[in-house]
Image (spheres, grey):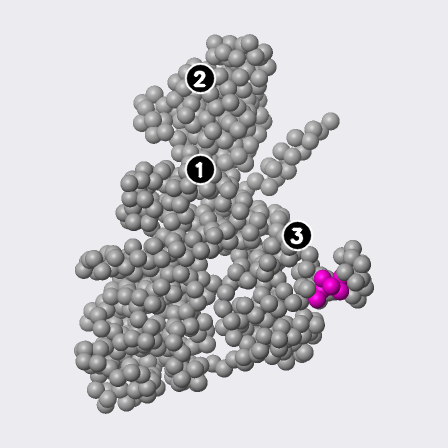
Amino acid sequence: MVRIVDRLRQRSQASFFGRAHELQTFKLNLSSEAASVNVFLIHGAGGMGKTALLEQMVSHARQVGLTCVRLDGRDLEPSVHGLLQGLATALGLPPSQAQLPHILHEWRQQPRRLLAIDTFEHLAHLSQWLRDQLLAELPQQSLAIISGRGKPSELWQTDPTWRHGSQVIHLRKLSTTDSARALAAKGLDEAQCQAITRLSHGHPLTLMLLADLVEAQGTVPESLGTDVIRRLTDCFAAQAPSPLHREALEFCAHARITTEDLLAATVDQAAAPALFDWLASLNFMELAPEGLFPHDLVRDAISAELRWRAPQRVAEGANKLLRYYLSQTQSTTNPSLRSLAALDIFFLTRGHPVMKRFVDFATLGSVSSERATLQDMAPIADLVRKELGPSHEALVQQWQDHEAATWWIVRAPEGSIMAAMLILELSGIPPQDQADDPALQQLQPWIARQAPLRSGDRVLHARMAVVRSTLANPGICINALQIRNFLMWMTEPAVALFAITNVDPDHWRPMMSHLDFQLIHGPGFEMDGQRHGTFAHDWRAVPQAEWLDRMGSGTSSSGKTEGDAARTAPSHQTLPEQAFKAAVHDALRQWQDPSLLGRNPLLSSRLVQSGRRPPEDAKDTLRRLIRSTADTLSEHPRQMRFMRTIELTYWRPAGSQELAAERLGLPFGTYRYQLRMAIDRLGSALWLRENDDASPASTTPD
């Protein structure tokens, strides 16, 4: 007869993927009576698959005839006596024989055994006793697996007795290949596998939670849902021994790199050394030359959970970090340190939904820009000709020797140029030198409409940027050029106006609008067969301190709207609130008819225009925004039943409202009431997004 536990183990083994190297090392030691490694020490962050790997190892040990003694630290009294009681019970000894001599005697009756202890973090203070009193006395044919969140003591690696007889296994994220195999085994298609792998960062628990969610709902969410986030945060934050430690962990999740100095400035000066040491001891922390940082998934989960639970604390924490980073830029003249501080400030914007679409924050800082030399000009001209065209190459020739022009480049490791950007200081360029450049011809009237420039005021223009199209990840170069612009905004003296000319301005408009850079001329200009547009910001109208406050608090930045920019910005229709909500209701009724939906006035709303992801059709953008807002509302227990009514009426229609009421198990009158309430609440949430550019998570009605 097959036991329930056997069936569950078979199911667990069938869904296990990855960790091939760790399992192979363990199997090699199973094949020998005198193993070269007797003790395997598994550690890793919560949800990283420690228990799953331990179960696989136990299964392999049983298959070759080892008797396995399996304990869980959560089930034992955290004392030597409790551990001995657990061992005695597992070995079939009476409580009166829960003593080390009796346990060792019983063990030696069948020396080819495996001791497996899971969740060892609850017994970590017993490590030395376990090693020196128990494991040291086991027969040489015996093996042990100790698994827990905490990193094993360095004594395992430095003690001459145990250094060669033990192996530390630090579990990290799954590879992309292993993640894809695990998801494909659950019947998900390639697109779903790629989306889940990207969202989970290879974290096994998140991978499986998202796979279950997709199996139930049929679609991959755009972000981690509240339930998933809370489960993950519980895994990561459970190790915080005090509120102060939890606060340090939260700041570490927000900051690009955490140092002891940062903790002293933001959490507690006296406790900073101890807090930093504690953070460094956590399994999900990575060490860098500048400090430490958490695994991407840990960062995402803790940040998202805090935004959901205490959004005001997020804003306060961001402002604390912002003040600290500003002090770093102002207290040093070291270009490298100022660049790092600017990078840290830019990183604070990673939680904004607009910025996440345009910046590859995962690779931020992996490459940097440097000033080009005279020897770089020929490769720059070649790159510009290939990627942008001959007219742009002519601009390179025009500006390469001009004293008002500075070229910044991003080099590949072997020295070739991967990207380049031209910065012009317009105050040093006479009018006749600007006559042949359409970007400068459009920029000059805008400059003339701003407040008069004072003596010493500077006008900088990022005239062109080019990235090699054959790169595997062009985002790292785009990051480097964006950071160079950001660093100039932070540190260049006396900058009054700053302009940026981009190819495909419609694509970049949402990010530039968030950064308070206005499109100065709606139609833009054509050059080398592509449309270009120029965005500009007046640093006198919205000074650095005010601008940084907006960026640091994570709010949308609309800035001070000047008349011409408003007239030339891409048009969108402004509807009164009631008309807007009526259009939402119409969109639901038009859901199954693309021709009718194509005439909905919401297609011209700011929400859809700024949220469109080219080449996405505006109708698809509207559908996506409505569905994502409804999905977020559904995460709130009080809203779930209302959104379910919309789903069965419009998105997966039952055929009639009567049938929809029947499928929902509601009297028809109750169904009609819930449908009206659902449409009103969805309309209100979308109206907030239209006016506040808020993320859906912030628009849940009470």
- Label whose residue precedes the other's in the sequence (3 or 1): 3
Side (left or right) of 537 relative to 682: left
Instruction: Give the main secondary structure, helix, strand or loop, of the magenta stretch.
Output: helix
- Label whose residue precedes the other's in the sequence (1 or 2): 2
Name the outermost residue toward the front: 702
The type of residue carrying mark 1 is Gln
Name above or below for residue 336 compared with residue 560. Answer: above
Name above or below for residue 270 compared with residue 504. Answer: above
**Location of residue 382 (image quadrant):** bottom left
Spatial separation of the CA atoms under disc 3 and disc 1: 32 Å
Which residue in the protein does label 2 denote?
A: 134
- Label whose residue precedes the other's in the sequence (2 or 3): 2
Spatial separation of the CA atoms under disc 1 and disc 2: 27 Å
Range drawn in magenta: 671-676
Side (left or right) of 191 relative to 560: right
Q: Position of residue 347 (x, y in %)?
A: 37, 58
Tell me whether the residue at label 2 lies in contact with that at label 3, contact meaning CB atoms closer than 8 angstroms.
Answer: no
Q: Secondary structure at mark 3?
A: helix
Q: Nearer the viewer, residue 476 or 516?
A: 516
Spatial separation of the CA atoms under disc 2 and disc 3: 47 Å
